[in-house]
């Protein structure tokens, strides 16, 4: 069975975290929503974790 859940295709640029939707567009930024499979996290984005760590540290 195919998942109907989609994720904002531009979330990396538009949002802090993936925005999921059942529609064809992102409810937050109005951009295209793409199928959430494969994983919304890009395994090649090796600096993502580092960036997120920096960002959370900034909140302190
Ligand atoms: Zn969006």
Image (cartoon, grey):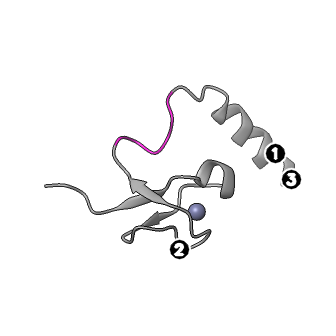
In what element is the residue under mark 3? loop
Q: From what the image shows, is residue 20 above or below residue 2?
A: below
Q: Which of the two discs, 2 and 3, sits closer to the camera?
A: 2
Q: Which of the two discs, 1 and 2, sits closer to the camera?
A: 2
Precedes in sequence: disc 1 or disc 2: 2
Per the image, is 31 magenta? Answer: no
Q: CA distance from mark 2 to mark 3?
A: 30 Å
For label 2, being within 8 Å of ligand 1 is answered yes
Is the C-beta separation of discs 3 and 1 under 8 Å? yes
Q: To which quarter of the image does residue 30 belong?
A: bottom right
Precedes in sequence: disc 2 or disc 3: 2
What residue does disc 3 label? 60
Question: Which residue is pictured at 62% across the width and 68% down the height?
Answer: 29
Q: Position of residue 25 (x, y in %)?
A: 47, 68
What residue does disc 2 label? 27
In what element is the residue under mark 1? helix
Q: Position of residue 32 (x, y in %)?
A: 49, 60
Question: Which residue is pictured at 34% across the width and 62% down the height?
Answer: 5
Left or right? Give the position of 40 relative to 53. left
Q: Residues within 10 Å of mark 1 (few under 14, many from 20)?
A: few
Q: Position of residue 47 (x, y in %)?
A: 67, 28
Is the C-beta separation of discs 1 and 2 under 8 Å? no
What residue does disc 1 label? 57
Question: Which residue is pictured at 40% across the width and 67% down the height?
Answer: 24
Compare residues 46 and 25 and report the one nearer the observer: 25
In what element is the residue under mark 2? loop
Q: Which residues are magenta?
A: 38-43
Q: To which quarter of the image does residue 1 belong?
A: bottom left
Q: From what the image shows, is residue 22 above or below residue 33?
A: below
């Amino acid at each position: 069975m195919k998942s109907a859940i989609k994720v904002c295709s531009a979330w990396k640029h538009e949002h802090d975290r993936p925005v999921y939707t059942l529609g064809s567009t992102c409810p937050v930024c109005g951009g295209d929503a793409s199928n959430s499979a494969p994983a919304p996290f890009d395994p090649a984005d090796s600096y993502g974790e580092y960036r997120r760590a920096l960002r959370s540290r900034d909140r302190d």
